Amino acid sequence: MRAVVYRGPKHVDVTDVPDARVENPTDALVRITTTNICGSDLHMYEGRTAVEEGTVLGHENMGIVEEVGSAVGRVRVGDRVSVPFNVACGTCRSCVSGWTSYCLRTNPTEGMDGAAYGYANMGPYDGGQAEVLRVPYADFNLLELPEGTDHENDFTMLSDIFPTGWHGTELAGVSPGDDVAVFGGGPVGLMAAHSAMIRGAARVFVVDKEPDRLRLAESIGAQGVDFSAGDPVEQIMEATLGRGVDSGVEAVGYQAHDPSGEEHPELVLDNLVAVVRSTGGIGVVGVYVPEDPGASDAGAREGRIGWDYGTFFSKGQHMGTGQAPVMRYNRQLRDLIVAGRAKPSFLVSHELGLDGAVDAYARFDAREDGWTKVLLKPGG
């Protein structure tokens, strides 16, 4: 089968790999109809993770069930399904508590709880930027979708970025009437803004410098804040008459940079501490890693980020972090899409066949204007 394979920094190709197959009785094979390039894939693409060469990429996947193992009873051949990026067993302490992103059984990597498809340090699972994906523990993991092709570009966001954006607002404690600051106008940040609006936020400020991202934020009723035009904290404080916002979402991660392009991994954390009011909440869903071989200082290379914890403590703020437990949210978000209350496909910019992945990775990584979210259609 054809798949997108990581070959080294700034180098992926589309090539033949061994066909996915049922390996355990609880597996299912899903023929991929849509798979997305995620902003977090770029950390691997840029050589800023420990991903192994030869890895099949892709953790945002949906499609049609093609084959099931002998122990699969709920999921049937022909079902249209969303595949959460979390690979979860369904029976460990984390899974039964609703924290499928920290499954205790699916990742053999030492010191790592939680597994995912096609991602560094997240277990031995091929990704879904391919024609077919093997899904372990299929009865537990797969979310059934309405038959047909309706909402395809909305449903494809259910595997990661829509639940991740929602998770950011949940960690931050967004409530109706709140003012919310979202730092990062990439796909996850835009999903966090969309989620905050659905949850009844009064105002949502989206901080970025890319014009296409700011336009998309404003298209859903958020207020764009261009950090290349001035200090974003000052801009938001002025807009809130000095009060600050009630909560904030960090959707940037460890490669945060200033307008000149210089990296400061603590930058967004510091800005959120400054702009969120006392006792307010901060949700961190931007990726941070235990090791960053490309960091500019020794501490950051070991995952040690020096940020303004003193002010965070003195303001009595609270913070939640980590990867989204997709299954905690994906059914409800699916139903919001079906009901017309949510339309996460607003950020889609490109739909390409699998062979378009090499060029798409390069353009998305370069932040070329208009390349906001790329969907790959292996059957197209």
Image: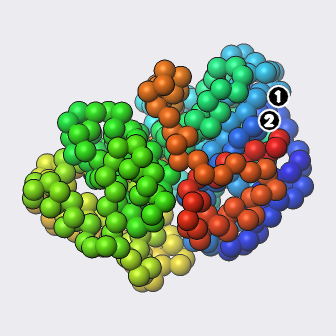
Q: What's the distance in space between the residues labelled 2 and 1, CA to CA?
A: 6 Å
> Secondary structure under badge 1?
strand
x and y percent of residue 157 in the render?
Answer: 57, 40
Q: x, y percentage for residue 254?
A: 43, 67
Quadrant location of residue 256?
A: bottom left
The image's mark for residue 31 is 2
Occupied quadrant, residue 309 = bottom left
Whether 187 is drawn above or below 258: the answer is: above
Is residue 3 visible to the viewer in this orientation of the structure?
Answer: yes
Which mark identifies residue 66? Answer: 1
Is residue 287 in view from this perspective? no
- The answer to whether 19 appears left or right of 7 in the picture is right
Q: As shown in the figure, which amino acid type bears the numbered disc 2?
A: Arg
Crowd around label 1: few <14 · some 14–19 · many ≥20 (10 Å): some
Give the percent coordinates (x, y) of residue 230: 27, 73
Tell me: residue 85, above or below residue 78. Answer: below
Q: Relative to residue 280, is residue 310 depicted above or below?
A: below
Q: Nearer the viewer, residue 14 or 99?
A: 14
Which residue is pictured at 75% across the width and 64% down the height? 358
Residues tagged 2 and 1 counted as in contact (Cβ below 8 A)? yes
Q: Amino acid at mark 1?
A: Glu
Which quadrant is the C terminus positioned in?
top right
Residue most toward the top?
73
Please say which color scheme the image uses: rainbow
